[in-house]
Amino acid sequence: MSFLRKNAVPLVAVSAGLLMVVGILRFALGAPATEPRDSDRVVAERVAASSNDLRVQRPEGDWLGGLGIIEPASPERKLAPAVPGRVAAVYVDEGDWVEPGTVLLELESTVERSALASAEADVRAAELELARTGGRVRSQDLAALRGDAEAAEARAALSQAAFERLEATFGSGGVSPEELDRAKRQAEQDRSTADAVRARLQSAEDARPLDVRVAQARLASAQARRDQAKGAVGLRQVVAPVQGEVLEVLIGSGEYAQPGGSEPVMIMGDTRSRKARIDIDERDLAKLSEGARVLVRADAYPDRLFEGRVESVGRRMGRKNVRTDEPTQRIDVKILEVVVDLGQAARLIVGQRVMAYVEASDATEEVADVL
């Protein structure tokens, strides 16, 4: 025991030296660090044989590669109701083709529909009132008043003529004072009656246009209330804004719909043709041009290439839109969006990730012109 205590430090130093020598010999006699081992080659071959990475399947030639996603012919429409409420009915299924104005979904609207029915009844009542004010019934009343006025005017004229005749013969003694006085009072009475009937006729004729205008105003007010009630019912419906296919229904009957949420209640788009939105790296922009030929490959069809043309090129750089979900992928690379027209590539599904290869253009002449 005393020997180990006395010689512990030298023994540790000798052991460390031996280990260092062994390490140096292994490093000197071993294979180069950059040369893979046989076991590494076996693993790599197995992974490569099972890999379906579209990015390594580049066609021959000078191509610009970029990940992309399939879109409908026109931008997707993410739909939601304008007001919150519980869903009463969903009228379409995924895959249905709809025309503009088709009601896709409706919220519960019992109160709103009752208000609409009441407003429509008010409109019908106002229409009848206007018809009565300016129609045949009112015209007949005016005709009767005109007849009464003419008759009263005739009686007043006849009474006045009789009084004037008696007054002319009164000096010769052929008429008594009582008869003359009676004829005078009759003439005055008939004149007063004629003036009163004429005044009623004038009042009726002056009031008729005003009554018509009042009835028209009541009808306009009723129509406005009806339109307001109809708009309230419309706010509780989701209507197709364009022609297209229902791509996804995200809500069902009985569920509560909240406008302005993170998720729409329905998604639709025009799938008569397909487009792809591709991310092109900023270092490849010099070789990019509209109308260039594009080849698109999808995981689902590894042995098939879908051909298209560059339809439009973005006007602003941005971040990547499509990712491979690999931890080694760089996400801080600036890209430019390129929209590719694929025609009727019906096998490609909206939202499907693809790898696109854009035929590179020769930018040498353009650069020379700029310089």
Image (spheres, helix red, strand yellow):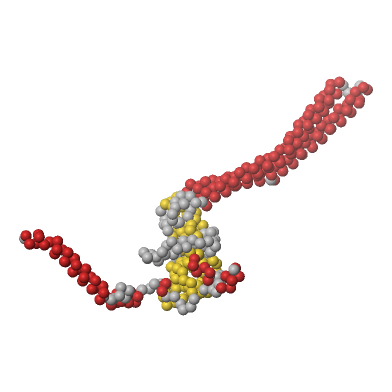
Closer-to-camera residue (90/301): 301
Tell whether 205 sits left or right of 187.
Answer: left
Tell whether 210 sits left or right of 13.
Answer: right
Residue 335 percent across, percent down from the top left: 48, 64
Q: Outermost residue, right direction?
A: 172
Quadrant of the snapshot with the C terminus: bottom right
Residue 126 percent across, percent down from the top left: 61, 44
Q: Outermost residue, left direction?
A: 1
Task: Tell me if I can see residue 341 in this picture.
Answer: no
Is 132 drawn above or below residue 341 in the view shown? Answer: above
Task: Tell me if I can see residue 209 in this picture.
Answer: yes
Q: Which residue is rendered at x = 44% and y = 70% of the image?
A: 354
Closer-to-camera residue (116/353): 353
Q: Which residue is rendered at x = 62% and y = 45% of the image?
A: 220
Quadrant of the snapshot with the N terminus: bottom left
Residue 30 percent across, percent down from the top left: 26, 75
Tell whether 181 sits left or right of 344.
Answer: right
Tell whether 230 sits left or right of 319.
Answer: right
Q: Which residue is rendered at x = 49% and y = 74% of the image?
A: 63
Is 92 drawn above or below residue 291 in the view shown? Answer: above
Closer-to-camera residue (117/242): 242
Closer-to-camera residue (317/96): 317
Is 104 drawn above or below residue 303 in the view shown? Answer: above
Q: Which residue is rendered at x = 44% and y = 73% of the image?
A: 297
Is 54 drawn above or below residue 99 in the view shown? Answer: below
Q: Outermost residue, bottom direction?
A: 60
Residue 307 percent across, percent down from the top left: 50, 75
